[in-house]
Image (cartoon, coloured by chain):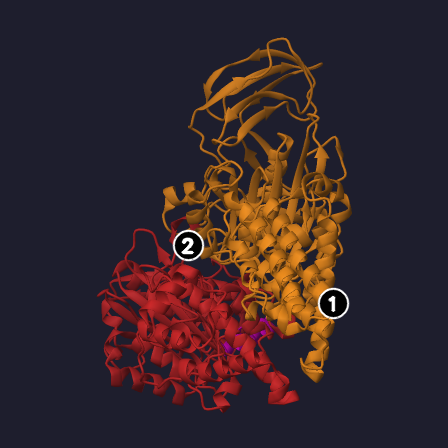
């Protein structure tokens, strides 16, 4: 027998209080039927004495609580998964929004799977070639990593993300590849951009899209990435696919967290964001990875726009503490017309050391990248000095470094939107820039590697 | 009598009908038997912090009070193990429930079946007192696990066995004044209570870490406490891992508190393959991991650092020097904040509870160089990483930590951007242990090691001042002496302080190597200054051929250290020929 409660007492924003409830569990889904018979979805957040605090996934507009009723479904949010989801578009609750037929699920999965036991994890160390020099050469992405793009409004993060999606591959490997695209609170234009791009390149048939537009419910925005990641886990761990999850825009997601937190009267931490934001972010990002004995993997590229270009803002800050590095976009480079405007000095891939080297890329890759970082950083410093004091005030060697820094930005970082460089091409460009220096300056390259480089090229 | 749930809010569960409950009693919540701890009592109601995901709990679910504080089972088998925040073995959890950690899993800390060979060291009828060693078990090739007389027990041995036993078998019986005490290979200890010692003693020995910037400039003492604050990407975790790998502590307890899952996996994969330079055995044979990754329940994060330090104290009591790494204490503080918010306490700064500082202090106070109950000198040292938001050290957790610790390794993102690792900023870091360690340095290294260290640090300070000048007026306005100072500072930074954790030789420098390298650099500096004073110009110093050899020093292997002496003599002869060349002209 289905039991409805007609005891809805309060509604504040998306939060609703139901009294005199029985046999209701925390985290359970609820179905609300309003005075006109329209259905809305919700979830139990808290239980206090005889009350349940329910969060609505849809808006609470136009609801007469005295005439509405609610029933609890006895289970948490689940998503029915199937291979047929590839090529389809869903909303933040996992319901098709592309007008296509219903999905006949292979099975239902809880969207909040338990944490992966660290003992069960397999360490990510397979090099992914993105074809983008500043990533492959200096901030290498590996399979199973979570590497966010820290962008800001107006910068071409969408272009970069779609280029990565287009070009990313593991060398010498023909495994099945899938993309899960999660859009949270983005504009219709941005969503269309990605969808069109996936269509143009044919990637769409391997893509599952979960889209929650800016105009849609902010509670659904919280569930969208969980739906997407659950589908990704199904594809990776049950269908053995290599899954790349692109999530945009984490900033919108965090705004929704704050909105809901303040509706619940919680004590805020920094800048009004809830104190559990770190844990909440971790429950998304930590779902990237590889599991022992499973063929598939989940690699995440979350995109976030830093409010006011400030990377100390809680959203990029907490993200950076969880993810394995970051790709930082720079407005200065963008203004200079350099695409992709990746600021390699503040970017970082924590897993790069395991993904590069002999048998993966080149034995001297690590030395080469350390030397590049050093030279570019010194060149940039010298350039700053030269702008204050004039060209002549800096030493001859520093002039060489300035020249290097300019060449580095123009030849190494800068590349076409459709230019797909192999790792060999990337490292060749790197060496062609570095070899201009006398050998005594190349301190970070080991002698045995220098000998090989000088001989080879 | 069973309690009934009347409120569920995140990790906080309130149960009624809990008469007789005590603070910090462990409760089993609902028929899933989720583990929780009582943190507040109001009349018959108790607030319980639950260490697992509370989804699915219902009002009216039963709560069972075990009447015991949160304890961990200590015994052989801890070494090489990975535990979660409340001391359950993650390997056992993996074997029983698979890839993901499910709620309500009942997993033991130790292997209950495994037989260990117990070798008694006392005889029948021996009089024993608390803390004395009764016998031992070879836990790993490098750790002998000593079985001690429990705290508060004084008496005569009435039975002592020899042979193979599991951890719950009684191996020794002791008759005290009024009772018999059974001792088995394992025992329980409540994690929030510090294990007793005879007394604390002053620190006098360093922990060598093989990291030049730490050992030479900002050393940590055995029994000392250090903090590593730094923004993300500045290499906190790499420094922590390097310390865990190379420090000369007997036992390493690594607490991954709210950090990345892959980092724990990295440690799990890498440590068994790395060889401890002191014992030539795999590092895992002296390491214990406590892992509460960021996606694991937040409440257990709060408990994880106590679990870690309790294990450390347990090994200390056997006479070992133990180091605890907590990465990161900020996540622990956030867990405190989250619970405080749910308890509706009045928040202090940035939402953190007002008792943050005292909790942190009482944690760090458990470290120290001590005389154990058994009369041995042993220590627990503690290194806590701090993750200040936005790298801003004025935030509450950093400030509360800085008030307690004696060593501060400040990481700087500008060094990290230049890929200068370890990115420990020498201008802001400090160690208050140097005076305590003076004797050690004088007995074990060159007599003027400390002088050289100060000399080099002075040059680095001068570099900072000169840099300010250069950035305003350019390099050319400097005199030859100042230019030389900048050159030497560059050598110190790049050839000494910079250390590549991923290079097989450079990743570890013994104190002896550090001593020689420092000597070499000081030699160059002194000769260069002398040359400038006698009228040579900067370009001449720059042209000294052996200058490039200094950069190769870090790659010299530990068994070929005499090569550094060759470089030193090379430098002397180069300067000599610089002087003589001039004379010829």
Q: Magenta span has B201? A: no
- Which chain is painted in red? A
Kindly report the distance in space between the C-alpha atoms of the residues bearing marks 1 and 2: 67 Å
| Residue at mark 1 | B534
Q: Residue at x 28, y 75 (%)?
A: A207
Q: Is residue B569 left or right of residue A215?
A: right
Dot 2 alpha-carbon crowd within 10 angstroms: few under 14, some 14 to 19, many 20 or more? many
Is disc 2 placed on a helix, strand or loop?
loop
Q: What stretch is highlighted in magenta?
A: A251-268
| Placement of the C terminus of chain A among the 4 image quadrants | bottom left
Above/below status of B362 relative to A250: above
Q: Mark 2 lies on which chain?
A: A
Is disc 1 placed on a helix, strand or loop?
loop
Front position in the image: B327 or A136: A136
Measured as percent of width and height from the top left, residue A273 is found at 60, 72
Q: Which residue is drawn at 55% across and 33% down?
A: B74
| Residue at mark 2 | A116
Q: Can residue B303 be seen in this view?
A: no
Q: Main secondary structure of the magenta part?
A: helix
Circles 1 and 2, Cβ within 8 Å, touching? The answer is: no
| Direction front: furthest residue | B584
Q: What shade does chain B have?
A: orange
Q: Magenta span has A267? A: yes
Measured as percent of width and height from the top left, residue A205 is found at 23, 77
Front position in the image: B555 or A428: B555
Q: Is residue B112 left or right of residue B98?
A: right
Q: Residue at x 42, y 28 (%)?
A: B113
Q: In which quarter of the image is residue A124?
A: bottom left
Measured as percent of width and height from the top left, residue A16 is found at 54, 72
Above/below status of B207 relative to A75: above
């Amino acid at each position: 027998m289905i039991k409805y409660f007609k005891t809805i007492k309060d509604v504040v924003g998306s939060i609703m209080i139901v009294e005199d409830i029985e046999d209701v569990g925390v985290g359970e889904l609820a179905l609300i039927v309003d005075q006109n018979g329209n259905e809305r979805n919700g979830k139990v957040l808290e239980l206090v004495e005889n009350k349940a605090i329910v969060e609505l996934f849809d808006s609470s507009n136009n609801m007469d609580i005295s005439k509405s009723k609610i029933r609890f479904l006895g289970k948490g949010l689940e998503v029915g998964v199937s291979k047929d989801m590839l090529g389809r578009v869903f909303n933040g609750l996992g319901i098709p929004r592309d007008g296509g037929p219903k999905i006949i699920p292979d099975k239902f999965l809880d969207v909040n799977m338990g944490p992966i036991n660290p003992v069960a994890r397999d360490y990510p160390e397979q090099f992914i070639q993105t074809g983008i020099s500043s990533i492959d050469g200096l901030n290498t992405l590996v399979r199973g990593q979570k590497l966010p793009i820290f962008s800001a409004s107006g910068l071409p993060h969408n272009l970069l993300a779609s280029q990565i999606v287009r070009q990313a591959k593991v060398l010498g490997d023909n495994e099945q590849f899938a993309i899960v695209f999660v859009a949270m609170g983005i504009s219709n234009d941005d969503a269309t951009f990605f969808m069109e791009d996936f269509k143009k390149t044919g990637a769409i048939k391997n893509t599952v899209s979960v889209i929650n537009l800016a105009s849609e419910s902010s509670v659904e925005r919280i569930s969208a990435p969980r739906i997407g990641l659950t589908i990704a886990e199904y594809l990776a761990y049950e269908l053995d696919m290599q899954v790349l999850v692109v999530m945009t825009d984490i900033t919108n997601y965090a705004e929704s967290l704050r909105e809901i937190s303040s509706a619940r009267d919680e004590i805020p931490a920094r800048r009004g964001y809830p104190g559990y934001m770190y844990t909440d972010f971790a429950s998304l990002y930590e779902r990237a990875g590889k599991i022992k004995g499973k063929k598939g993997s989940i690699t995440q590229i979350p995109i976030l726009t830093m409010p006011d270009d400030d990377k100390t803002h809680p959203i990029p800050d907490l993200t950076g503490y969880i993810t394995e590095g970051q790709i930082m976009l720079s407005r200065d480079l963008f203004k200079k017309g350099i695409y992709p405007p990746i600021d390699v000095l503040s970017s970082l891939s924590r897993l790069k050391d395991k993904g590069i080297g002999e048998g993966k890329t080149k034995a001297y890759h690590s030395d080469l990248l350390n030397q590049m970082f050093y030279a570019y950083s010194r060149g940039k410093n010298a350039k700053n000095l030269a702008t204050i004091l004039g060209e002549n005030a800096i030493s001859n060697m520093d002039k060489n470094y300035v020249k290097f820094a300019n060449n580095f930005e123009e030849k190494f970082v800068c590349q076409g939107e459709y230019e797909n460089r192999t790792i060999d091409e990337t490292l060749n460009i790197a060496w062609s820039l570095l070899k201009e220096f006398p050998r005594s300056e190349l301190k970070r390259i080991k002698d045995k590697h220098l000998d090989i480089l000088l001989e080879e090229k | 009598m069973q309690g009934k749930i009347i409120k569920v809010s995140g990790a906080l569960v309130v149960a009624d009908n809990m008469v007789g409950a005590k603070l910090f009693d462990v409760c089993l919540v609902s028929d899933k038997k989720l583990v929780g701890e009582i943190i507040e009592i109001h009349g018959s109601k108790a607030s319980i912090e639950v260490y697992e995901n509370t989804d699915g709990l219902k009002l009216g679910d039963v709560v069972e009070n075990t009447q015991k504080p949160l304890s961990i089972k200590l015994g052989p088998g801890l070494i090489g193990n990975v535990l979660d925040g409340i001391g359950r073995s993650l390997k056992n959890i993996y074997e029983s429930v698979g890839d993901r950690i499910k709620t309500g899993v009942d997993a033991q800390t130790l292997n209950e079946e495994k037989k260990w060979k117990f070798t008694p060291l006392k005889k029948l009828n021996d009089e024993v007192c608390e803390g004395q060693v009764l016998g031992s078990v070879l836990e790993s090739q490098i750790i002998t696990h000593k079985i001690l007389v429990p705290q508060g027990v004084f008496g005569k041995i009435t039975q002592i066995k020899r042979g193979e036993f599991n951890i719950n078998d009684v191996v020794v019986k002791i008759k005290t004044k009024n009772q018999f005490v059974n001792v088995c290979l394992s025992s329980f200890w409540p994690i929030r209570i510090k294990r007793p010692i005879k007394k604390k003693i002053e620190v006098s020995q360093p922990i060598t870490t093989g990291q030049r910037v730490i050992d030479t400039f900002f050393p940590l003492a055995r029994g000392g406490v250090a903090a590593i604050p730094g923004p993300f990407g500045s290499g906190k975790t790499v420094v922590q891992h390097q310390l865990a790998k190379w420090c000369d502590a007997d036992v390493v307890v690594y607490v991954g508190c709210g950090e990345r899952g892959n980092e724990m996996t990295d440690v799990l994969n890498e440590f068994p393959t790395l060889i401890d330079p002191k014992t030539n055995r795999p590092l895992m044979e002296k390491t214990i991991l406590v892992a509460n990754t960021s996606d694991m329940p937040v409440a257990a994060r709060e408990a994880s650092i106590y679990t870690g330090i309790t294990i450390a104290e347990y090994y200390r009591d056997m006479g070992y020097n133990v180091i605890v790494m907590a990465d990161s204490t900020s996540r622990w503080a956030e867990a405190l904040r989250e619970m405080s918010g749910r308890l509706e306490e009045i928040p202090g700064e940035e939402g953190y509870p007002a008792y943050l500082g005292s909790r942190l202090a009482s944690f760090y106070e458990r470290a120290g160089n001590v005389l154990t109950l058994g009369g041995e000198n042993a220590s627990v040292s503690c290194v806590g990483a701090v993750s200040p938001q936005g790298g801003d050290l004025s935030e509450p957790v950093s400030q509360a930590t800085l008030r307690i610790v004696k060593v501060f390794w400040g990481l700087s993102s500008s060094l990290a951007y230049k890929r200068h690792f370890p990115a420990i900023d020498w201008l802001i870091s400090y160690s208050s242990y140097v005076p305590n360690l003076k004797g050690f340095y004088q007995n074990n290294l060159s007599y003027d090691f400390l002088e050289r260290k100060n000399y080099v640090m002075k040059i680095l300070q001068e570099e900072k001042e000169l840099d300010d000048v250069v950035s305003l007026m350019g390099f050319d306005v400097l005199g030859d002496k100042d230019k030389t100072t900048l050159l030497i500072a560059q050598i110190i930074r790049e050839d000494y302080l910079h250390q590549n954790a991923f290079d097989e030789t450079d990743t570890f420098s013994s104190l002896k190597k550090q001593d020689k390298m420092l000597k070499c650099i000081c030699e160059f500096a002194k000769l260069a200054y002398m040359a400038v004073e006698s009228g040579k110009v900067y370009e001449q110093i720059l042209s000294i051929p052996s200058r490039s050899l200094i950069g190769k020093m870090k790659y010299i292997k530990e068994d070929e250290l005499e090569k550094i002496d060759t470089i030193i003599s090379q430098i002397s002869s180069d300067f000599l020929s610089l002087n003589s060349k001039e004379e010829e002209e």
